[in-house]
Image (cartoon, rainbow, N blue to C red):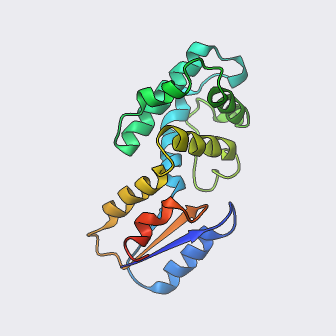
Amino acid sequence: MYIVGFTGKSAAGKSVAAEILRNIAHVKTADIEYSDLFITVLNEWLPFISFKPGHVSKKMRMLWLMKLGEVMGSRLGQSLLNDIFIKDVDLSSELSNSLLKALDTIPSKHLGTGAMVTRETKDTSYLPLFNWLGRVSRQVIGEDVWGRVMERYLHQKEGQGLELITICGIRTPTAETLPIRSRGG
């Protein structure tokens, strides 16, 4: 099995290059994108964000962060519910303030409505929130969080008879790529 990871800046063409490779390979392939976890988390979490962020009480922010910890924990297979609060006890920290700024960039028609985040909309309507979630994940869970996520994705794909796996959304070739390299990718 070949594993090919594509690194580069946002909108650099990583997904397009991966798609071209999969199309010309003529083998059984799979596509993994780091942003898929973000998309899943946001699609589970955003329906709970139903108020205009600039007019939200500290209690509501606390509930949002609790739900985020619950959703992230279920997706990463560990309990993160308390970890997010330890980083944001007073809800006036940079974590909470930057969340409000990121949410302010999302059109209100998307909050609490069930509007879905997709690979196509992640870099337009939701980019500040994606950046916030990535930063918080590294702060709360650890710098190697995305390497662990990739390890889980690759483990799920093993045994499926795949000949090629393309991986996109790798912004920098750091610890995120270790699960790829350890498998010869």
Q: How many marks?
A: 0
The quadrant where residue 99 appears: top right
Q: Is residue 12 above or below residue 94?
A: below
The residue lying at 54 percent from left, 62 percent from top is: 174
- Expressed as whole percent of the image width and height from the top left, the position of residue 71 reads 43, 35
In what quadrant of the picture does the C terminus appear? bottom left
Residue 36 vs residue 72, the one in the foreground: 72
- Expressed as whole percent of the image width and height from the top left, the position of residue 118 reads 57, 51
Q: Is residue 122 above or below residue 176?
A: above
In what quadrant of the picture does the N terminus appear? bottom left
Look at the image and tell me whether residue 108 can be seen.
yes
The residue lying at 44 percent from left, 65 percent from top is: 178
Q: Is residue 134 above or below residue 169?
A: above
The residue lying at 66 percent from left, 44 percent from top is: 126
- Expressed as whole percent of the image width and height from the top left, the position of residue 130 reads 61, 45
Look at the image and tell me whether residue 116 can be seen.
no
Residue 111 vs residue 183, the one in the foreground: 183
- Expressed as whole percent of the image width and height from the top left, the position of residue 38 reads 52, 47
Q: Which residue is outermost to the left?
A: 159
The quadrant where residue 11 appears: bottom right
| For residue 32, side relative to residue 131 (left or right) | left
The residue lying at 33 percent from left, 65 percent from top is: 157
Residue 128 vs residue 185, the one in the foreground: 185
